[in-house]
Image (cartoon, helix red, strand yellow):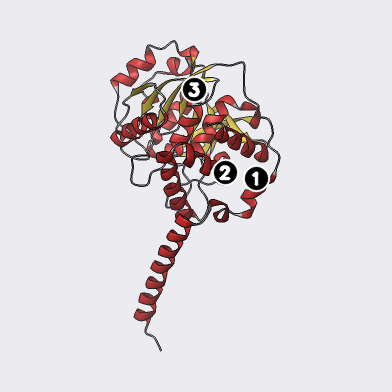
Amino acid sequence: MLSKKRVIIIAIIVFIFLIIGWWFWNQNQPFVERLFSNRMNSQNSTPSPTPLDNNIKNKVIIITDCALDAFWHDPDDALALLYLFTNQNVDVEAVITTFGNTSEPQVFNSVQLLLQETGFTTTVIRGAKNKTDINIEVKNFLENLNASDYTLLSIGPLTNLQVLDKEKLQSFKKIYVMGGALKHGNVIPLFKKEWNFAKDPDSAKYVLETSNVELITLDTTTRISLQPAVLRTIFARYPILGKRIRAWDTLNKFLYWHVAYPHDLIAAMAITNSGFFNVSTENLKVLNGQLKKDDTGTSQNVYDITDITSFYAAISDWAQKL
């Protein structure tokens, strides 16, 4: 009979071999075979027209913690940037970097890598390096804007917005925020908090207390996963981005046993595809980095996807036109 020690050693060895085998399988199998069958139902549906807000030309400023240059190659923010750069109804006026998914210098390098790979140009402003960083360049840039002409999209920690007073924050045309979770978070150990809010709870609390935002929570973004056709199209059009998406997809499936969720892409799509979302008004507070409903909280617009099938079709249509 095997001793307890030998059983543990054998179990560890088997686990290691399973992980290695799973890794190679992910690297060599078509993406179609790697997705759950219920994720593929949308592939067989007839694409619905994309309800773009065609009469609106949005001047957008993006706050991002893009991590293409990090070890885990998280391209989630990059997909959001790519979507807005390629949208005819959007002018990306500036990209502001922030710590979050990785260090701010790596975020800056990631944004530069994306611009180099895609050929797009915009102003890039170095932002917060940590949650106590009061960045004067960002503060001056945002305060000198005619804010009512601009839409803000924050897809990272909200530190860069904490430098603004209540009056300035409320003067922007709209502020879209990808952050918070009312049901299940994505931060270990308890999975109660969402990553962006958890990285700087005080800034999240401040922004939601002082302004009315368009909030795209984790509860909404985890309803959509990346499709095989989208991945293949991006691989073909932008090889550097494609390679990183593949690594990211593999990492997500290892950690959570599901395909990757493009959280920030969904938040970006809310700017130009409002018809895909149902918007409800909720009184919300941020307590210790966790988003909660509270009658004493500030009224916020919370977005939820109305038609999953049409949303998948819109993402596929966008990828095909890259």
Query: Label 1, on which residue?
Result: 43
**Amino acid bearing label 3:** Ser
- Is disc 2 in contact with disc 1, using a CB cutoff of under 8 Å? yes
The CA span between labels 2 and 1 is: 9 Å
The image shows residue 103 at horizontal and vertical percentages of: 30, 38
Query: Which-is-in-front pick, marks 3 and 2?
Result: 2
What is the three-letter code of the residue carrying label 2?
Ala
Residue 214 image position (x, y, % from top left)? 54, 27
Q: Position of residue 33 (x, y in %)?
A: 57, 56
Label 3 element class? loop
Residue 217 is left or right of residue 21, and the answer is right
Mark 2: which secondary structure? helix
Element at badge 1? helix
- The residue where tag 3 is placed is 211
Quadrant location of residue 310?
A: top right
Residue denoted by label 2: 229
Q: Earlier in the sequence, mark 3 or mark 2?
A: 3
| Residue that appears at 41% across and 44% down | 244
Judge by depth and name the residue closer to the eye, 98 or 164.
Answer: 98
Pick the residue in front: 289 or 38.
Answer: 38
